Image (cartoon, rainbow, N blue to C red):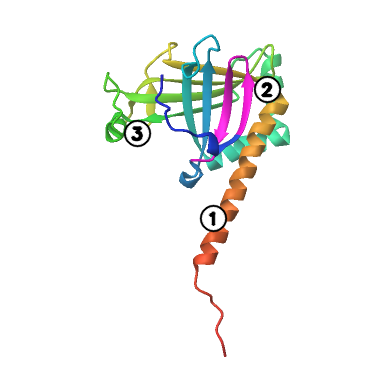
Amino acid sequence: MENNTEDLDRYQIIRKDARNCFVETLSDCFINNKVHLGFSQYDMARQKGERQTSRVNIYIDIPEFLHLTHEAMSGALHMRAKQLKDLNDPKPLYEHLGGTSAERLAQYGRPRPDAKSVSRIVKLIWGQKVDYLFIADSGPGEADAKGLIVPRFGKNPENHVSVGLSWRNLDELLDMTITHFRAWLTAQYVNDAAKQPSSHTTH
């Protein structure tokens, strides 16, 4: 399971729960121009403090996340989902591949025992019993010539979380996150402006 000891509660924007799992968005990476999504699976039968069984952290560039949000809010995403469902086409509506290189993990002091990189994948697909499944996987990967982390776990990820969402819950997750980013960005502009010397001159 991924190391997730840092307390991120104060950065949480919105959380959507499903059976024994949830997806949350966080603002801690806005400064890096990214949205942080945390996918967690838990087992309530375990002792408190040991209930989390899987955790996958996904980091998506703001422009890419904004495009997905616009597609959902315009209805285009939901229309595309209906078309794929009618065709029984399992193609993801959205997919993002990311990860952390072995070199970067070593710099962080958290190298994998197998010395590989960490691959992280998130997919949005239409569901049978719910409107959507938001799925996150992580496991061993390798950096290609372009520096992209290619997954090397096949169909057996080390961490797997699948969160069922209604179309309304998906819209709320995306829109609330972008609303918070815009508020954060406005605050940055205001703070920067306050630090600038006054341009007014006295005649």
Q: Secondary structure at mark 2?
A: helix
Are dots 2 and 1 in contact, CB under 8 Å? no
Circle 2: residue type: Ala
C-alpha distance separating marks 2 and 1: 36 Å
> Disc 2 vs disc 1: which is toward the camera?
1
Mark 3 = which residue? Answer: 147
Mark 2 = which residue? Answer: 81
Q: Position of residue 1 (x, y in %)?
A: 41, 19
Q: Earlier in the sequence, mark 2 or mark 1?
A: 2
Are dots 3 and 2 in contact, CB under 8 Å? no
In the displayed structure, 146 sits above or below 203; it is: above
Residue found at x 62% / y 41% = 178
Q: Quadrant of the C terminus?
A: bottom right
In the displayed structure, 164 sits above or below 200; it is: above
C-alpha distance separating marks 3 and 2: 31 Å
Magenta run includes residue 203: no
- Residue sitting nearer the eye, 12 or 80: 12
Q: Residue furthest top?
A: 45
| Residue 5 seen by the camera | yes
Query: What crowding class fits label 3: few (fewer than 14 Cα within 10 Å), some (14-19), or many (20 or more)?
Result: few
C-alpha distance separating marks 3 and 1: 31 Å
Q: Which disc, if any, is residue 188?
A: 1
State the count of labels.
3
Would you say the magenta stretch is mainly helix, strand or loop?
A: strand
In the displayed structure, 154 sits above or below 103; it is: above
Q: Secondary structure at mark 3?
A: loop
Q: Position of residue 38 (x, y in %)?
A: 52, 28
